[in-house]
Amino acid sequence: MGSSTWVDGLTRKFRQELQELVDSASERGFSPCSFRAFVGGLRSLVNSVGLEAFVRAVQAQDETAAAIEREDRRLRFRDASTKEWLTPFGRASISRRVYAGDGGGAGHVPLDEACGMTGQFMTSEVAEMAMFAVALITPREVEQLLAKTLPEGPSTTAVQHLLEQVGGALDAQQAEIETTVHEARPLSEDGDVLVASWDGVMTAMREDSKIAWREAGVAAISVYGQGDEGPDKLDTRYFARMPESGMVSLIAQIEDQVAALTTTRSFREFVVICDGKREIWNTVRGSRVLRSARCILDFYHAAEHLSEASKAIYGDTAKARRWFECRREQLQLEVGAISKILRSLRRALASLPSTCNEHGIVRKTVSYFTTHRRRMQYAEYIARGLPIGSGPVEAAAKTVVQGRLKRSGMRWSRDGGQRVLDLRTHVKSDRWEPMWSAYLEAA
């Protein structure tokens, strides 16, 4: 039967059933209940016709030759085999011709190859829905969600298997996929300040049948422009890695991103903004790519230390709060403020008994400010139109890692967590489409 014949027949069927559906709605009128029934009937009709058209159109594209050539091998038609494909219209049973060599071996299915369905159960549209969803919610919740939105959704097990497959491909093709994403959706070209930040997030890991808390890494690479009220974040890429020694993979990703950006365009300033961890600043000093950055200690971490010192000096009192607000504003707006604040802290330290807990808190603050004073020239940074807070990476810690990996009772393997993070960072960076296109091309 030619395609025009079955297309005509299917069109007549659709027109007839659609007309009946519309006529019935017209006779009864709409109430909330009948309106839901109408929408449900329309969806069922579209899915029914779509599924039949899908099966017929796909099977019509199957190879018909008695023998084919593949990789310098001659393969002969052996048999027809039926396979279940999960489509946006429901589950389809597809009959495909199988070819094999005279010496045996694995069969070859040209139709699967042509449709990108070799070894696959879900069509790419359903697979994308499942993987986008699993970046946000658990596989079980994905099953429940897609059961509501599709005629038939994938099972939890099918989602988990697909996640393992996609995650492996993203890892194996990381460089190629990243190149595609960078070319298709580069960071905004409107800004002139490049900012890199990274931090750690404690994550529950499964290790030898035990639970261990380890530090996952999260990073943000942002472009800032000048807004009416100061630096304006225009665009951000997020990256995250499961726990590993020294955050080696995460740092490599940061360096790759910075190198790619700074060699293809110019920035007025390149800045690293992080908290006070010694390992972070040792990494910056030792990195060929990052050592050229202007280094800024995140202002809000500095302010937290000031707040703790104010309470240690004056107790939890109004005077402590006034002292803190005054010194905080001074630190942010006054050139050379760090020297004045250190003198004030040292005077307070001398007045406290060396054996009391408060003495230790103030001493710790003095040490912290002394270590980072070169990174705390906030008035100068503000005058240069630079951000002074690591807001993007703080947000990433919450939305990229904590919001997905730290739900109640969750425990992770490194591979399992990384597969989710690789998907989630592209969702949160608003770069899902180029990533998924690159994955399909590489598959």
Image: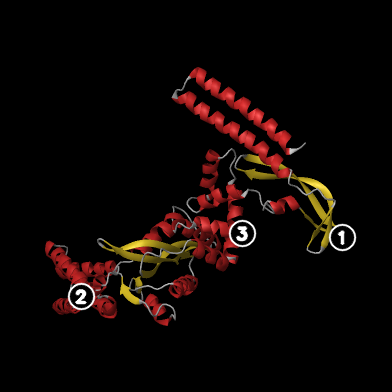
Secondary structure type for disc 2: helix
Outermost residue on the left side: it is: 319
* Identity, as a three-letter code, of the amino acid under mark 1: Gly
Dot placed on the residue nearer the N-terminal end, 2 or 3:
2
Q: Quadrant of the C terminus?
A: bottom right
Q: Residue at x 73, y 50 (%)?
A: 111
Q: Pinpoint residue 408: horizontal percent, then vertical percent.
A: 44, 52
Measuring from the top left, give residue 411's x and y in whole percent. Answer: 49, 58
Q: Amino acid at mark 3?
A: Glu
**Residue type at mark 2?**
His
Q: Residue furthest right?
A: 102
Instruction: Write down the residue under mark 1.
Output: 103
Rate crowding at label 2 as few (under 14), some (14 to 19) or many (20 or more) other CA atoms within 10 Å.
many
- Quadrant housing the N terminus: top right
Residue 113 seen anywhere in this rendered image of the structure: yes
The residue tagged 3 is 441
Q: Is residue 142 left or right of residue 369?
A: right
- Total label count? 3
